[in-house]
Image (cartoon, rainbow, N blue to C red):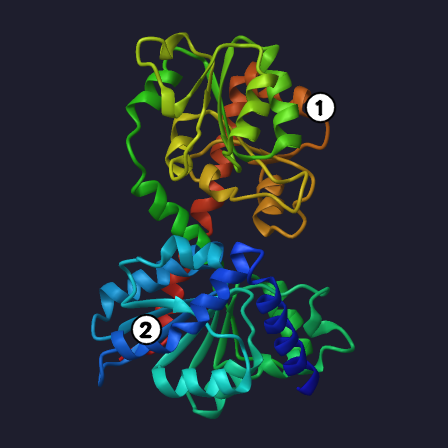
Amino acid sequence: MILYNIGIYLYYIALYLLFPFSRKPRQMVKGSWVVGRILRQQMEKGKPYLWFHAASLGEFEQGRPLIEHIRAQYPQYKILLTFFSPSGYEVRKHYQGADIVCYLPMDTPFNARRFVHHVQPKMAFFIKYEFWKNYLDELHKEGIPTYSISSIFRKNQIFFKWYGGIYRNVLKDFTHLYVQNEISKKFLAKLDVHNVTVVGDTRFDRVLEIKEAAKDLPLIERFCRGTKHCLVAGSSWQPDEDLFIRYFNRHPEMKLIIAPHVIDEIHLTEIIDKLERPYMRYSRINEAKIEQTDCLIIDCFGLLSSIYRYGDIAYVGGGFGKGIHNLLEAAVYGMPVLFGPKHQKFMEAGGLIEEGGGFCISSQEELDKLMDRLLGEEEFLRRSGQNAGDFVRKRAGATERILELIDFR
């Protein structure tokens, strides 16, 4: 416990040291300064609050279906949403599904006591990988029902190491853990943690909701019209682009939409320099020439999940770096999904491969061979896409299962 708290304080000191030089630490420190003021100004006395905590944007999207279903079914509750990372808070600080949105102060014993005492939540929900010891200990001590949502456990996590005793004890603070798969339940049983139910992953519910709310994009539709096949490359990085652009340059029978993960001018110029066929940037689109354009570069954010619906094949980037981005946003539209080799930490990647809707490629040769088959064999393309869509639909429903198991009355 002492070592854990020392580590937290050292991390806090590091943020202060980086404060003048880096935007992210500066945002985190400033955000933690004003949490008390936000709570004093915005909390309604006498109202019951449910507290949801997400590390960043990805975890928030995972918990969002549960937040919005509770909001609709149990309007008597107010929602407090906290983030650890600026990547979540700065994007969702005006999220209308919550009554209060703020940072979570650093996990010191003092901060945890003060925060929990001030909020006095009726229930607390920690999404996926959030295991803050002092907050969880305080919630447990106060007898506040606390749940882990869409969590997943692997043998290489600290809980299962010989030195992970402190973290193993944290798991026993939860009233219940709603995990993604049976393997997670088995690992927790080895730690004598049995208050566990396998419900699946709420991300499947979320991508189905996103699909239903997808924007109509007439210019994208017009761009794709008149071509047999269009590849949508989402959240791509340079190693991804090297592969699929090289293939695209040699295959005039297809079109390409690139929505890179980074859209600064340097990266956009690198992409353009690789293209040997006519292209247009989305922000400078020329309606008169769009049908003569072979490649469309999306140089803005917020459209990718709606763009996938217009494609025939998806390539999701990140698999040659730290890890692939959101495969489910593409798979939900019933299209085969290609990605790079670093996917082992992503359950959905293995599932898509197993069911024939996803394909891992690690070289130009592998990409070329697979794309030749997808473009040349209509039945293979159709079946692969159907497998991807079925993979998502069959795994939906985690949100409803959680709602059925928790008593919100």
Frontmost residue, 120 versus 123 = 120
Q: Residue furthest front?
A: 20
Using the rendered image of the protein, determine whether residue 120 is visible from the camera's viewpoint: no
Label 2: how many Cα within 10 Å (few below 14, some 14–19, many 20+): some
> At 48% from the left edge and 83% from the top edge, which residue is drawn?
112
Task: Answer with left or right where residue 341 lies relative to residue 42.
Answer: right
On screen, 132 above or below 297? below
Q: Quadrant of residue 354?
A: top right
> At 37% from the left edge and 25% from the top edge, which residue is drawn?
283
Q: Which residue is mark 1?
A: 364
User: How much space separates mark 2 and mark 1, taking CA atoms?
Assistant: 52 Å
On screen, 87 above or below 285? below
On screen, 11 above or below 255? below
The spot of residue 70 in percent (x, y) is: 29, 67
The residue type indicated by label 1 comes to Gln
The residue type indicated by label 2 comes to Ile
Instruction: State the quadrant of the N terminus.
Output: bottom right
The spot of residue 287 in percent (x, y) is: 31, 14
The answer to whether marks 2 and 1 mark residues whose Cβ atoms lie closer than 8 Å is no
SS of the residue at dot 1? helix
Q: Which residue is mark 2?
A: 38
User: Along the polypeptide, which appears first: circle 2 or circle 1?
Assistant: 2
SS of the residue at dot 2? helix
On screen, 176 above or below 312? below
Q: Quadrant of residue 202?
A: bottom left
The spot of residue 90 in percent (x, y) is: 41, 55
> At 23% from the left edge and 81% from the top edge, which residue is drawn?
47
Q: Residue furthest right?
A: 162
Label 1: how many Cα within 10 Å (few below 14, some 14–19, many 20+): some
Query: Which one is in front in this view, the residue at disc 2 or the one at disc 1?
Result: 2
Using the rendered image of the protein, determine whether residue 30 is visible from the camera's viewpoint: yes
